[in-house]
Image (tube, helix red, strand yellow):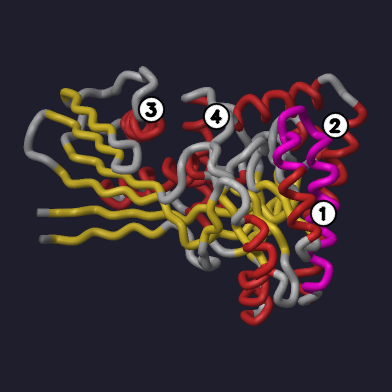
Amino acid sequence: MKIIRSRAPLRIGLAGGGTDVSPYADLFGGSILNATINLYASATIQPLESDFIEIESIDKNEMLVYKSDYQLPMDGKLDLIKGVYNRIIRDFKCEPMSFRLTTHVDAPPGSGLGSSSTLVVSVLGAFAEWLKLPLGEYDIAHLAYQIERQDLNLAGGRQDQYAATFGGFNFMEFYKDEKVIVNPLRIRRKIFTELQNNIVLFFMGTSRDSAAIIEKQSTAIRSNTSVALEATHRVKEQSIKMKEALLRGELDKIGEILHFGWEHKKKMADGISNPQIEELYNEVMKAGATGGKISGAGGGGFFFFYCPGNTRYKVIETLSQYNGEVKSYEFSMSGLYSYTIEQ
């Protein structure tokens, strides 16, 4: 029996978050610095000799069965996965297939780690491996973006698909006509190891509707709202500051750069922060953190803080007073990986 497996890493957005969203990226060009971590979206395909398609999401505890067909219905049930199948059939003129597709994601939707986009990339990777599709890294990332933003009409940016596909530390540039340039960063091992030690990742225990926040952000840019526009310019500036600090090994600047970005990100749209988030942030700063930010659109999900020296322990103690969980992680230097096993 043949088994095709694929996995892609989730990411934390270190700087520039939101500048990859249209229309800002189309009008002004966006830039983001992100890094992938060892939390993953995984997909497994087992070809079947039947006339059925079985789709199972382990983390969502959902199972769907369909008669093999050219298109699967978009009805709100595991549409991300079905959207990949429909696009594969359409773009590569495939005949209906029979298979069991099983997925698992190590973080919930709305967590701010790019879990939805990473799942799409992982499922695409599994199909590309199975069908031997002529897709490179940029091809897979762009196709994943089109499936989410165009086929499924889901609001969001462009960074997640590229982070999941390429992996590692990347400085990404976003332009009009969906053009993206990924610049992998060669960061010294001791620098990213110290960064890993000093960044405390905290899941706030709530998932938020990132689409609603992103839509507010896009509306503010379309309306030429001066406060939101200037804030987005500053957040883009943050990504350049972060890139320079990491490449130069200037870790003492990381917290300050994160704080600079967080203060401006909150002005990009309503809902990014709230009184509970502000209280948590202020208490963590009192405990010794020098900066932090929400990973993703905002409103909840994963928050991370830069804690120089040995302040991480006092920060973790402070975070224990709040509902949520400090999450252990390591940076992952590899992106999408797919392979086939004959059993």
Say which label, 1 or 3, has the lower sequence index.
Answer: 3
For marks 4 and 1, give the one nearer the viewer: 1
**What residue appears at the point 46 percent right and 42 percent down from the top-left corner?**
108
For marks 1 and 2, give the one nearer the viewer: 1
Nearer to the camera, 143 or 252: 252
Q: In the visual, does 108 lie left or right of 33?
A: left
Q: In the visual, does 101 lie left or right of 245?
A: left
Q: Which amino acid does label 3 sit on?
A: Asp
Q: In the visual, does 338 lie left or right of 100?
A: right
From the image, tell me which residue sits under label 3.
79
Residue 149's tag is 4
Q: Tell whether position 266 is magenta.
A: yes
**What residue appears at the point 23 percent right and 46 percent down from the top-left corner?**
45
Query: Looking at the picture, does residue 263 appear above or below residue 8?
Result: above
Q: Give the range drawn in magenta.
A: 251-278
Q: Is mark 2 on a helix, strand or loop?
A: helix
- Residue 115: x, y in percent? 49, 44
From the image, tell me which residue sits under label 2.
228
